[in-house]
Amino acid sequence: MDGKGRETKEKILSAAFSVFLKNGKAGTRMQEIADEAGVNKALLHYYFRSKDKIYLAVLKDVVQKIIMKIVENIDLSLDFQQIINNLIHTQINKIKENKQVFQFIMGEVWMNPDEVKAVFKETIKILDRSALLVIMERINEAVLRKEIRKIDPFQLIINIFSLDIFFAIISPILFDITDFSEKKRMVIENNRADEVFNFVWESIRLRNEE
Amino acid sequence: MDGKGRETKEKILSAAFSVFLKNGKAGTRMQEIADEAGVNKALLHYYFRSKDKIYLAVLKDVVQKIIMKIVENIDLSLDFQQIINNLIHTQINKIKENKQVFQFIMGEVWMNPDEVKAVFKETIKILDRSALLVIMERINEAVLRKEIRKIDPFQLIINIFSLDIFFAIISPILFDITDFSEKKRMVIENNRADEVFNFVWESIRLRNEE
DNA sequence: GTCTATAATTCGATAGAC
DNA sequence: GTCTATCGAATTATAGAC
């Protein structure tokens, strides 16, 4: 493929990325992608054959990016308490920055579970899992030296992810159906990471009495 | 409307319920509802005018049931620790029993956010909120008599919901992409309620040292 | 490689007979 | 109240000219 062709293909892919993220698979029209890319609709088929193929390309890209983002950038040089604190704050910030991506994935998971699961599986296979494994290792170490109580690392990670992710994806609806003031909403959102860390740390730290 | 008409209408609604739950709004075909109900497709329009109208009827019913289920049946005669324990176990059981309903709502929230939000708002308005309010009251009381540490009841409830709901809706994908044995999967699923209660209680209970 | 025009299909909705 | 037949809109996909 020559330079011009590659350029066009990338324009289409980038447009598809933004349109699929906004509307989901079912809500996306090939015409809208073409308009967004500034090319003719027929070209989408010339380069990608079908809507399904473009969707799959976008989905792979999105899933890969989100998995990377959620486990990367964890500073392991800190002490254990700070690692957990750092993990929670980093994760919640990443989620805030990529809300649209999370909501897209949540939507697609239910509409196209098999497609999404397959992409997740494939991505995880080629992924560098070391970051997550190192954290689990650190959890086990902290248990052994009695800094925290005995807990299954897998369950602890799941609990942290639940507290981080569920709130973020549900908060638009939550604040829409409750009658909090804008100010209270902001306070709750901004304090969420501290609240989660506090909740988690109080649960796992070992006290002197024990 | 005579007896026969009412009966047909109910057959359609019941079929619509099962088909929408399985496929979501976008994935549902009027023909499939008609087949499921054993009537002609034209009759759906005779009784409900449009697909949107049937969907709305189903959505209202589903949302109402799920909100009721999640807050009802909390035994308030117990002591505080047991109320929290009971709340978590009841909720997780309800979620397990109604997994399809939860997954349907999660899917619809992203595909039709405005429609779903509106139905939630409306349902909450006519809902008996006393159960949830009483729990928040009990939380405040427990703080005052120093049974648990100081915590915002709203945040505590959100945290419990996160730990209960997120795991349940994500577990099919989680177990699909990891390589746990069937046995380990069962153990984790069956112990989830105990794990959550333990995690929450360890986080909030006040010790003697403090 | 890119465009115009159109085929092909799917699906919600309706008209009209019984 | 129920069915058959069909319309019309929306949308993916392709054929063919440039």
Image (tube, coloured by chain):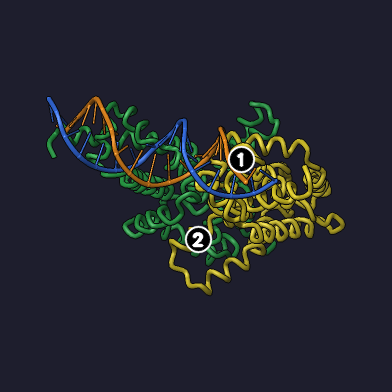
Chain colours: A yellow, B green, C blue, D orange
Q: Work out whether residue A130 or residue C15 is closer to the camera in this orientation and state it.
A: C15
Q: Callout 2: helix, strand or loop?
A: helix
**What residue is shown with label 2?**
B139
What residue appears at the point 66 percent right and 61 percent down from the top-left corner?
A: A97
The residue that label 1 is drawn on is A45
Q: CA distance from mark 2 to mark 1?
A: 59 Å
Quarter of the rendering containing residue D7: top left
Instruction: Give how far across and how far down residue A82 sits, in percent.
Output: 79, 60
Along the line of sight, the residue nearer the viewer: A151 or A44 = A44
Residue at the bottom extreme of this rendering:
A183
Does the rendering let one see residue B207?
Answer: no
> Does A185 appear above or below A147?
below
Mark nearest the camera among 2 and 1 is 1
Q: Report whether residue A17 is seen.
A: yes
The correct choice, above or below, for B209 with respect to B98 in the image is below
The picture places residue B51, in percent across and down from the top left corner, at: 33, 43
The x and y percentages for residue A12 are 65, 50
Circle 2 residues within 10 Å: few <14, some 14–19, many ≥20: many
Residue at x 73%, y 51% (from the top left corner): A7
For the C terminus of chain B, the quadrant is bottom right
Of the pair B136 and A125, the residue shown nearer to us: A125
Q: Disc 2 sits on a residue from what chain?
A: B
Query: In the rendered view, would you say B130 is above or below B103?
Result: below
Residue A169 shown left or right of residue B73 in the figure:
right
Front in this rendered view, residue B114 or A60: A60
- In terms of secondary structure, where does tag 1 sit? helix
Residue shown at 75%/47% (left/top)?
Answer: A6
Q: Chain of mark 1?
A: A
Callout 1 environment at 10 Å: few (<14), some (14 to 19), or many (20+)? some
Tell me the number on the disc at residue B9.
none
